[in-house]
Image (tube, coloured by chain):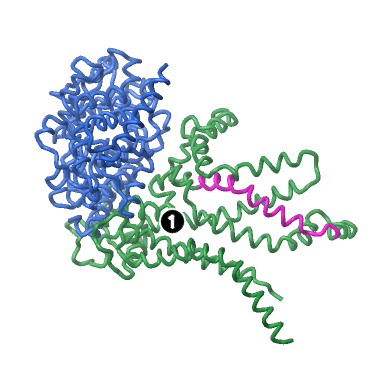
Amino acid sequence: MRTERRAARRRQNRTGWAMALPACLLVFLFLITPFVMAFGLSLTNQRLISPNPTEFVGLRNYQRLLGIGFLTIDPITNDDGTIRVTDGETEYPRVRNFTRGNPDYPHLDRMREWFRLGISDDRQFVVLARDVVFIKAVRNTVLFVVVVAPVQSGIALILALLINQKLRGINVFRTIYFAPVVISMVVVSMLWRFIYDGENGILNTLLGVFSFGAIEPVSWLGNTSTALPAIMAMSVWQGVGFHMVIWLSGLQTIPQPLYEVARIEGATQWQKFRYVTWPGLRNTAILVMVIITMQAFTLYPQIEVMTRGGPLDSTQSLVFQAVVRGYEKQDIAGGSAISVLLFLFVLSISLFQRYLTRERD
Amino acid sequence: MKKIGTIAAAVAAVGVMAGGASAQTKLSMWYHGAGNEVESNLVNQIIDDFNASQSDWVVELESFPQASYNDSVNAAALAENLPDILDVDGPILPNWAWAGYLAPLTIDEAKLEGFLPGAVGRWNGEVYAIGLWDAACAIYARRSVLEANDIRVPSLDSPWTGEEFDSALEKLASSGEFEYALDLGMAWTGEWYPYAFGPFLQSHGGDIIDVSANMANGSLNGDAGLAFGEWWQSLFERNLVPGTDQDGADRETGFLDGKYALQWNGNWSALPPLGQFGDDMLFLPAPDFGNGPKIGAASWQFGISAISENKDGASAFIEFAIQDKYLAAFSDGIGLIPPTSESAQMSEKYRPGGALEVFFELSNDQATLRAVTPAYIVGGRVFEKALADIANGADVADTLDQAADEIDADIEANGGYM
């Protein structure tokens, strides 16, 4: 009796594993293997094209990406010891005097200035990085996630609430909101390049018309201050429909009687949302946030099509840099190192999100 | 009628191939021009003629879209699956030769005499590929505009000096008739930057990579490089040229519409303005910034893969393809510059008195190769970014330092590309 049951269970197990096998195989082949390979390659000097053998280089690729240095510089003094002032500004020596073959500063060799702070009137603190472009890519990507994740999920929720009504023709709105999602991001980016065009773009034309010419045309993608926000706005618009649908599915799982009870109790619209809808959306919210965060970290096609990282690195992103290095500059090892760092970033943020949203009893 | 002819030809071709297949060896050939019908017809014509002209070899063509051609070659090289004959873009030829994709040609050097320098792909003392054409850049201008602004019309023998060019731009800008004095084509990202603007650096006396020293430091960021960088940045600061956010449509039509007084452009765009402005249209030589007037050289060229087992046959095909009649046919068909003076004479537009004759002269006199080293493949990309950053206001010395360091780090990482 007992052995029979055990045999049946074993048979069941075997069927289960057999059914899971194809999926496991695909996951192993196309997700786990490439990641392990990327990790391995990031410890070598692998090139895209090269007749030379690949060598193990340890953590060198990571050191080159993450190397940071500090430097305090004093103003240039005149022969008599006074501080030299040109055009009303204290003149400092150029950073390249310290970073290019200066025997007194070997640890700063070939580093570049990231930013500087004035400590006092006659002293400046300079933060240097071995790879400023990478550091800027990290900063831009994080900024992108921090802005896009809440804005996109917020707007998606509002849209979902709006279309979760039984109105005539509501499907038309659902379709309109969802339409950008089914268009390829590359196509969307191309179209928005025209919208953002500095001279004849639709956005500038509209702003000009509605402000009666008071707003001068802005080169949205050509200014360091507007390029990244412009890409953020477009990305939110493109992805919002997808998350709206997820929210919508969450909304429709909330039992109607709860709303009826709330109505009988005399709850206001806000109270209904706060005490019925929002708690009912808890799991959906976690899902939406995790998906948006991961998607936002892999920011790439918009950058490739619209700005290629410019102007002045104001739109560099991690994935874009991984592609540029690994592919255009043929440095597979360097590109792999960026991919591994990106993976660690996303993993730690996902774990942190899991921790924040854990079940509390 | 024409269709019937084509079908008949195809049937005949199949018949010939089937009949002679047993004695003939197949040569596979890859070409980057898929999607362009005229170009495909020209290549097919050469192949058909070659196959009919002898009985040892049969060339079979496979065409790729240009955007994915290099990827396909890289993938095939990794899989040791390269075709016998392939075409390669001039500036990356040294890299492919170094990487062992290409074998040196065994062609008689005498046959290459009289070829434009940009059409012969040399590296390390060997010829690896030959082009059926070249391309050239010129300053597009209108005689009436120059005369109205009291600007001397330069000639091949006496091009503008750097100062003359600069003052011409200032005059055109202050005339107030144009949005910008000059259109450099900043909208055309990619290889256009090093191809079109690298010669300005070379004319200043620098280069992206100093090939003899095998490094970029001292050449890209040396005195000549810094002088070039300062001048480059000043063009944008003085609002003489549109910046990196230039609208692609303006690049295409801005000169025709009179938005731009001058335009830095290639021979492939020459016919529309010539049609619009007629005799008023001028194609001016590059200015001389002190080290001679220079324009970019080298386009797509045909070579033989290193793993080909039929190098004799591949070589025979390339020798067959560089007959003047085919060079002229390519020029007539898709507007490229024929690479020999004989073929130029046979061509419609580049023969003496032809509409684009000046481009052949420009190619002959001013064409300068992009740094002939395997390191160019990375150097060109780094230079492109540096030019864009400097145009957007980045510090010139710091940007060129960084670019030179990056190129040198790549050279080091590749064991000096030895």
Magenta stretch: includes residue A254: yes
Q: Residue furthest top?
A: B279
Name the quarter where the N terminus of chain A is drawn.
Answer: bottom right
Colour of the chain lettered A: green
**Could you tell me residue B195's position as x and y percent?**
27, 38
Q: Which chain is blue?
A: B
Residue A281 in which image quadrant: bottom right
**Could you tell me residue B388's position as x and y percent?**
34, 42
In the image, B314 versus B89, the foreground residue is B314
Residue B62 in which image quadrant: top left
The residue at 45%/43% (across/down) is A305
Q: Which residues are magenta?
A: A229-257
The residue at 35%/51% (across/down) is B75
Q: Which residue position is annotated with label 1?
A: A318
Look at the picture and state if A250 lies above or below B349.
below
Q: Residue furthest left?
A: B110
Total marks placed: 1
